[in-house]
Amino acid sequence: MDIGGIITAALVVGVIGLIIGVLLGIAGSVFAVTIDEKEVQIRKCLPGNNCGGCGYPGCDGLAHAIFTGEAEANACPVGGAEVAKQIGNVLGVDVKPAEQRKAFVQCKGSFDNATLNEHGHKICAYGCTGCKACMEACKFDAIHVVDGLAVVDEEKCVGCGKCQAACARHVIAMVPKFAGHMVACSNPEKGKAAKAVCRNACISCGMCVKVCLAEAISIESGVARIDENKCTGCGACAEKCPMKSIV
């Protein structure tokens, strides 16, 4: 064994490591990104769930967007009014809390209500399939599949919209947190065709439209839709709906 050779090799490796370390240090200083202290304070206000419900890549992305004015100070759906207020204090402005939202499943097609084929699958081409994609997307344990149908836990739902984005059938809508009556159906088929696939399908009969004194209901693409801005919550539509598709 050549001791001299080993020592030389060790010295060479050490020198190379030292050079690399120096170069990395210089590069770090040259390319370092300076973050404003106010942006850091905004980030501290955010809850850190990184759910993406705000439309930005995590809380860091939202903090930067708020700091630069690209996003509103109340853009965090998880933090709600309290976080909006804290960010407003950092920015020195009054912030109006954003409207709270919640997920709503526009379907009542559980295994008990839906018509099943010989393989035990629901035949409705427009309703919830019970695939659990929404459940897996939710970071707040606010949605579960029960009897083949997605069910939202309103106490846990923060309105981030991840379940809505994950739903392949597009049956999950984001509605006002304190919305009253809603139509739990997405099937555009009418009459017998709708009845054939689910006992609670909207059949576009228009009965709800007729009894609504607030003119808050209309039939759109074969399905009744309620305008929450006009709805008074009287419940006449739900009472008269022959299919019980209004909840």
Image: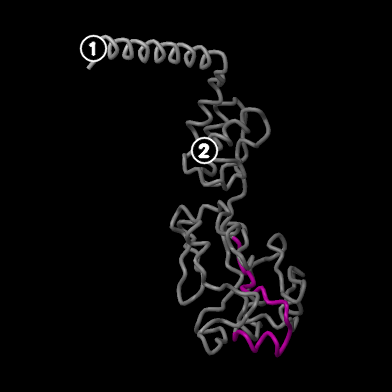
Q: Percent x, y for residue 194?
A: 68, 84
Q: Pointer 1: what residue?
A: 3
Name the residue carrying label 2: 83
Q: In the rendered structure, which segment of residues is drawn in magenta?
A: 179-199
Q: Nearer the viewer, mark 1 or mark 2?
A: 1
- Name the residue at 50% across, 64% down: 152
Location of the N terminus by quadrant is top left
Query: SS class of the residue under badge 2?
Result: helix
Question: Is residue 186 rendered to the left or right of residue 111?
Answer: right
Secondary structure mainly formed by the magenta segment: loop
* Three-letter amino acid code at the position of disc 2: Val
| Residue 72 forms part of the magenta stretch | no
Q: Position of residue 120 (x, y in %)?
A: 50, 85
Q: CA distance from mark 1 to mark 2?
A: 65 Å
Q: Position of residue 4 (x, y in %)?
A: 26, 9
Q: Residue at x 56, y 83 (%)?
A: 114
Which residue is at 57% across, 72% downward?
Answer: 128
Q: Quadrant of the C terminus?
A: bottom right
